[in-house]
Amino acid sequence: MSYSRQVTITCENNSSADCSVDAALSIIGGKWKLKIYKSLKSGKPLRFSSLIRELTGISEKMLTTQLREMEKDGIITRAVYLEIPPRVEYQLTDLGHSLDKVFSSLDTWGRAYINRKAL
Amino acid sequence: MSYSRQVTITCENNSSADCSVDAALSIIGGKWKLKIYKSLKSGKPLRFSSLIRELTGISEKMLTTQLREMEKDGIITRAVYLEIPPRVEYQLTDLGHSLDKVFSSLDTWGRAYINRKAL
DNA sequence: CAGTATCCGTGCTGATACTG
DNA sequence: CAGTATCAGCACGGATACTG
């Protein structure tokens, strides 16, 4: 089974701003990516089972898929420890940590939006 | 035809950070929203046909859908001029303009990501 | 424990044709 | 000009069962 995705990063007709924003959204968009980022944000490596527990509602398949994509995108690392029982730990890379500003600006805007709607 | 969507903004089990980020992504996520934002960013009101021209590749149906959602979310206004031929102009609201920081942080991160991958 | 394999529904997105 | 209506494909996300 392959986890290939189409992340068209060639810019063609679009301005570079479109392109960069698209690239960013292709990596942090979707239902789970930013939640996974948030779980790993502290820097502490987490195991598969810990992530399943934190991300209430995600299926094993989805978590696997999302983690593989994030690994491919260079956002996280995957460390396999050959033990019994097996242990796999996920951790943010430097590139992953650099999502901090994006996350916080989304968070800030989202909060403001919710407050405004609550009026 | 109704354009209702489910934008679950109740926070339930999730922390407020999850919730706000989700709210933000539900509004600016997707394939076209930020491109439309970008077209209207300057503040100049644009007509339907102008937007179609700028957003290469979008269908009329998609543009209509996206614009209606953004209007509902309070991001843009829709002004109808009862003339012949009809004229409709779209413009960012203050709330829409407040997306500036979100847009630029995505843009900045995306550029950095692309440069990094180009190594 | 940490996955894979398989099946499947829904909704996002698109193409095309038509209308006030 | 600025849409609606209709049909359709396919990717996203989910449920469940199985495995090294």
Image (cartoon, coloured by chain):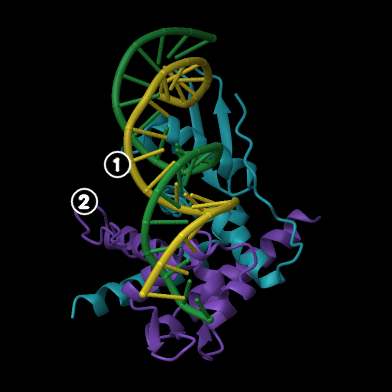
Chain colours: A cyan, B purple, C yellow, D green
Tell me the subunit letter for badge 2. Answer: B
Position of B15 with respect to A68 (left or right) is left
Query: Is residue A96 at all visible to an observer of this figure?
Result: yes
Specify the amino acid type for callout 2.
Answer: Asn
Instruction: Please give the residue where the numbered disc 2 appears in the rendered image.
Output: B13
Q: Secondary structure at mark 2?
A: loop
**Outermost residue to the right:** B119
Q: Residue at x 62, y 41 (%)?
A: A5
Question: Which quarter of the image is occupied by the C terminus of chain A?
Answer: bottom left
Instruction: Please give the residue where the numbered disc 1 appears in the rendered image.
Output: A56
Specify the amino acid type for callout 1.
Answer: Thr
Q: Secondary structure at mark 1?
A: loop
Name the spot of residue B75 as percent of width and height, x first: 39, 78
Question: Which quarter of the image is occupied by the N terminus of chain A?
Answer: top right
Instruction: In this rendered view, identify the residue nearer to me: B62 or C11.
Output: B62
Instruction: In this rendered view, identify the residue nearer to me: D3 or A106.
Output: D3
